[in-house]
Amino acid sequence: MITRSLWLVHQAYLTARTLQLSKLLVCNRQPGEVILDPVYPERHFAILKPLVLGLLLIPFFIYFQAPAIAEITIAPATSVTEAGVTESLEEAFGLPHAKADNMSPDQIWTMLGTGAWIGNGNPNAPKVVYIFSDPACPYCHQLWREVRPWVEAGKVQLRYFMVGILGSNSTAKAAAILASEDPQASLSRYEQMIHNESLEAPIEIPSTARSQVQDNEALMHNMGFNIVPGIVVRNQQGQIERWPGLPAPDELASMLGSLNSN
C-alpha cells in the first residue's frame, strides 16, 4: 500500500512538473513561434492541481489512520449460555453485575419461587417458566400468544411477574391485575382482549399491589433485566437461562422443549 502510494505521488510530481514546464514554455514563447492552444497547459494545470495535492496527502493519511483502522474489531454476537447470558449481552442491556450473577441456580430458583407471581397453565407441568411482563408491552402480548401451544398441552406453566416500566399507566394496570380477586383470571382475560387499553386502571393503587409491583421490578433488575419480556428458565442440566426480549421461534422451541414428547 505504501509503495503504491509513493508511486502515485511520484507520478503526480512528474505530471505537475511537466505541466509547469509547459506553462513556462507558453509564457516564454519566441516571436513568430506558433502555439495552437496557448491556454491549454494553463487550464489543465488548474484542473489537476487539487488532484495532485490530494495524491500528496495519501501517505500522511495512511501513516496516521492505519493504526486506528487496524484496531477496529467486530463485536461477537450475543447469545445465551447454560449459565445465563454472556457478558456482551449483559453489557448491552445495561446491567452487567446483576445480583443473580453471584447466586447459585438453586438460590435463584428459590428467590423466584417466593415472589409475587401469577400462574398460567398446568401447575404440575414438567417445565416452569418465569416471565417479567408489562401490561403495555406489545412483545409480552405476542409472547403470550406464541406459548399457547405448550400451555394448552400441559407442557409448561408460566409464572408472570407483573411490572410497570412502560407508559404512565403500566404500574396502575399491573397493580389492577395483582389486586383483583382472581389475578390469574384477570391476567388471562387481559391478554385475550383485542384492545388491551380497556383494562381500567384503579384511581388509587392499593398499597399492597403497589408494593408487589415494586418488588417485582426490583427482582427483575436483580435478575439482570431492564427490558420486557424477561424470561427465566431452568434447562435439563439444572442451570439458569435468562432470555431478554422476545425469543425467535426456534429459540422458543429450544427453551420450552418439543410438543411431541411425552
Image (tube, helix red, strand yellow):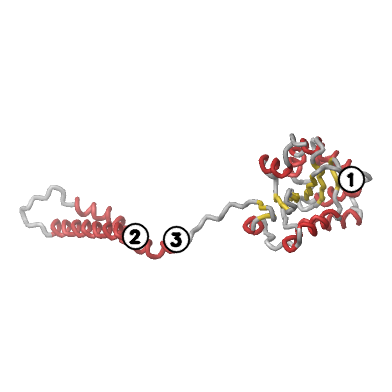
* Residue 53 vertical position relative to residue 173 in the rendered view, above or below: below
Quadrant containing the C terminus in the rendered view? top right
- Give the class, few, some or many, for how many residues have Cα within 10 Å of label 3's Cα (few <14, many ≥20): few
In the image, what residue occupies the spot 70% across and 42% down? 252
Question: Who comes first in sequence, dot 3 or dot 2?
Answer: 2
Q: What residue type is labelled 1?
A: Pro
Specify few, some or many for label 1: CA neighbours under 10 Å numbering under 14, 14-19, or 20 or more.
some
Q: Compared to 175, does 248 lie above or below?
A: above
Asked if one can make out residue 83 in the rendered structure from this viewpoint, the answer is: yes
Taking 119 as reference, is 31 left or right? left
Identity of the residue furthest to the right in this view: 181
- Rendered location of residue 143, percent (x, y): 74, 42
Q: Mark 3 points at which residue?
A: 70
| Quarter of the picture holding the N terminus | bottom left
Q: Tell me the CA gap for discs 3 and 2.
A: 17 Å
The amino acid on which the numbered mark 2 sits, given as a three-letter code, is: Ile
Residue pushed farthest left?
32
Which of the pair 192/122 is nearer the observer? Answer: 122
Q: What's the residue type where badge 3 is placed?
A: Ala
Q: Where is residue 224 in the image (x, y as percent from the top left)?
A: 72, 57
List the residue tagged with mark 1: 183
- List the residue tagged with mark 2: 58
User: Which label is found at residue 218?
Assistant: none
Q: Quadrant of residue 45?
A: bottom left
Pick whichever, 173 or 152, lies toward us. Answer: 152
Q: Residue 227 in the image: x percent, y percent? A: 72, 52
| Quadrant housing residue 83 | bottom right
